[in-house]
Amino acid sequence: MQKWPWKIYGIFLTVLIVASLTDMASKDSALRMYYTMLIAFHRGYGVLLVLNIISLIINLLAPLVVFCYAFNVKSSLKFWQVFFFIRLFFDFIGHYYDSQCIKAAFFQSFLYGVACIGVFIIPILPSYIAHYLYAFKKPT
């Protein structure tokens, strides 16, 4: 079975991850300013910034697993199985800024909030599908 859609998605995901890293590194980004303001009010909010950075670093491997799945690369499945749950965990706790944007969207309207959830989840959902298929499904 040809997996060319996964290869194209792997390129898209790589661009998305690089854009996220660039956004965090840029001093003029809304994301960076948000965390700077939070930390200015209370140093404890630095934990949220660290969790976001850890999430970004962990997601650097997300395109790799998509490409491994697309090109049928054989590797240690145990690592990818454990990494699946680590990635899922940090995606839930490492996006405080995004969760606050979604929360603000729900204050505007319910449909806008649902649309914001879709904007954040839909681009990464295929990477989790590929990751699961690669790590947990037995090859036929």
Image (cartoon, rainbow, N blue to C red):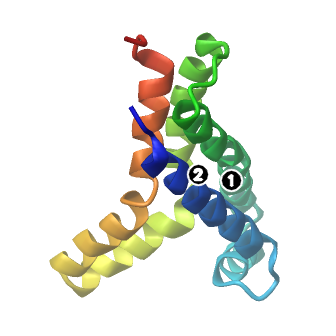
Res. 136 image quadrant: top left
Q: Is 27 rendered above or below residue 66?
A: below
Q: Residue at x 65, y 76 (%)?
A: 31
Left or right relative to 114: residue 53: right
Left or right relative to 116: residue 134: right
- Which image quarter is the C terminus in? top left
Comes first in the chain, label 1 or label 2: 1
The residue to which callout 1 is attached is 56
Report, in whole angstroms, how far the alpha carbon at label 1 lies from the one at label 2: 8 Å
Which residue is at the front of the view, 137 or 89? 137
Question: Residue 140, which numbered label?
Answer: none
What percent of the width, then of the height, locates residue 78? 60, 11
Left or right relative to 7: residue 121: left
Residue ranking furthest to the front? 2
* Three-letter amino acid code at the position of disc 2: Gly
Q: Residues within 10 Å of mark 2 (few under 14, many from 20)?
A: many
What percent of the width, then of the height, locates residue 135? 50, 20
Residue ranking furthest to the left? 110
Which residue is at the front of the view, 11 or 23? 11
Q: Residue at x 60, y 35 (%)?
A: 65
Res. 44 image quadrant: bottom right
Question: Residue 94, which numbered label?
Answer: 2
What percent of the width, then of the height, locates residue 83? 60, 26
Dots 1 and 2: beta carbons under 8 Å?
yes
Q: Residue at x 65, y 84 (%)?
A: 30
Res. 121 image quadrant: bottom left
Say how many tags the image has: 2
* Three-letter amino acid code at the position of disc 1: Leu
